[in-house]
Amino acid sequence: MTSQLVELYRSAASRHGDLFAVDSAAGSVTYRELFADAGRLASELSGAGVGAGQVVGVTAPAGAGFYPLMIALRMLNCPIVPVPPGPAEDARLVRLGAAWRADECGQWPAAPRLTRLDGGGGTSVVPPEVVYVIGTSGSTGRSKDVPVTEGNLAAYTRQMAALDRCRPGDRIAQNYQPYFDAFFDVVVLAAVGAATVVVPAEREGLLVSSFCRRQRITIWNSVPSQIRYAARLGMLEPGSLPDVRVGEFGGEPLTEDVVRLWRSAAPSSVIVNSYGPTELTIAVAEYVLPEAVAEQDPVGDEGGIPIGEIFPQLEWILAPAGDGRTELCVRGAQRFGGYLDPRDNLGRFYRGSGEMLGPVELPLRDEDWYRTGDLVTPSPDGLRYVGRIDDEAKVRGRRIDLDEVRRQLVADRRVLAAWVTVVDDRVVAAVESDNPDGIDLASLDLADLRDYARPVRVVVVRRFPLLPNGKVDNVALRKLTSDG
């Protein structure tokens, strides 16, 4: 079986072997050295009993040692399940049929510590053509395991090569962990363009201005909230990033305040709004913002910043979602083949075309549409994200637009961000503020909201709890607002 990752790095080692592939606190390694290290590591793993096709869980701190391990495992056709450090994920690995856990030590070129999993190595639910498995658990607390195959990743790689955004000599900030699929976006971009992946040390990536200057970053890649947080820490000074030529943001909606902060710090950079669910392999659309140089220049309109056009190798439709809203549905080479637990596939796909869409009877077919759950609307600049299909709730039979409540909360200048949900038939909220002691429910102007839509409780924090991938931890916020 041909491995997309192996071939990417084999090609880069052949064409640009003397260029640096990875730069980290543990040192720098060229593409030629990296590929050779991966080959040696594959032999060591095989000698230790790691068999071809066996599923391997890999703990994934921010160390450079993940890169040769990733390539070595794919040389053995072993599907990779990146997990956070620690034993808590072992039960999930066993459920997936993983035979091993490899504790990536973060050093170079030290081999990982292998642990044979008790109860693992049985019947695997992960096919050998799967490159990696990402667990999507941000909103439910229960992991839905998404397998990304060689075909999925090859299709995404073709699209990135066509964009031709990355070039030899570029240095890309790796602000993601491998259990967040955007990590593989950086991997693909770098390998396609023979650029250098720069791995921050611990939380160095939050010190945006100093990190980018010291590491000579030319392409920045992160969730938007990382920029907002860095600015609040005083780590994103105006004009401090003159050499960054691309700022790519994804994983959560890109907002105007983040665009303005970034433009102020990196006035010469192109800003890319990247969109895509994990189930569709990293990204399926992007929008390159037009240049703007003045503070008053608009960066969006009332419809928000576009997510742009869906990649041409994919097909998409807008399915009716009630009340004139439309849900984005996508199919094509980047669409995954379904969650590893078939029960998770129920209700997540459509079959048919036009107004003849209907629920899917398993097993899935290639022509089935994946329901993203994202509400979008067309515009002259491409599609615009307007919220989640489940972003409306009913309280005592009355419909509430949770995003409208959020907008009302952030209209208060003291509120930096807001999160809203319904608990026990009542609206509750959490807000971020630099002065949490100075805000309470009574001081917020919620007069424009109907009485049943007004939060009965507002929890104020300096910063929302985050998942390891940098996204807001919805489960933790739900518990926080429920316990308040």
Image (cartoon, grey):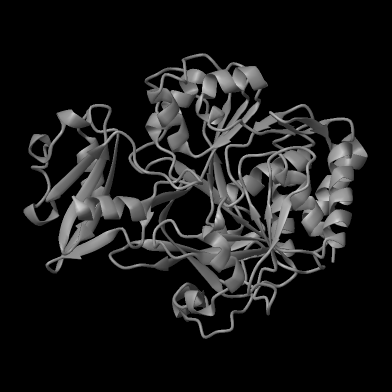
Residue appearing at x 23%, y 27% in the figure? 435
Q: Is residue 420 left or right of residue 288?
A: left
Q: Where 183 falls versus 134 (above or below)?
A: above
Q: Is residue 163 visible?
A: no
Where is residue 258, by image quadrant?
Answer: top left
Residue depicted at x 46% and y 19%: 264
Q: Quadrant of residue 417?
A: top left
Nearest the camera: 109 or 312?
Answer: 109
Q: Nearer the viewer, residue 143 or 447?
A: 143
Counting from the top left corner in percent of width and height, residue 448 is at 11, 44
Q: Is residue 312 left or right of residue 274?
A: right
Left or right: 11, with 88 as reference point: right
Query: Could you say where residue 277 lies in the image, as x and y percent from the top left?
Result: 52, 56
In the depicted structure, whether residue 16 falls above or below residue 471: above
Residue reaching furthest right?
14
Residue at 66% over, 25% down: 218
Of 227 and 126, nearer the camera is: 126
Residue 54 rendering spot, x and y as whole percentages: 75, 68
Seen in the picture, residue 122 relative to 26 is either above or below; the reply is below
Q: Quadrant of residue 43?
A: bottom right
Q: Position of residue 333 (x, y in %)?
A: 67, 64
Q: Residue at x 71, y 63 (%)?
A: 79
One can see residue 89 in this view? yes
Q: How many marks?
A: 0
Name the quadrant of the N terminus.
Answer: bottom right
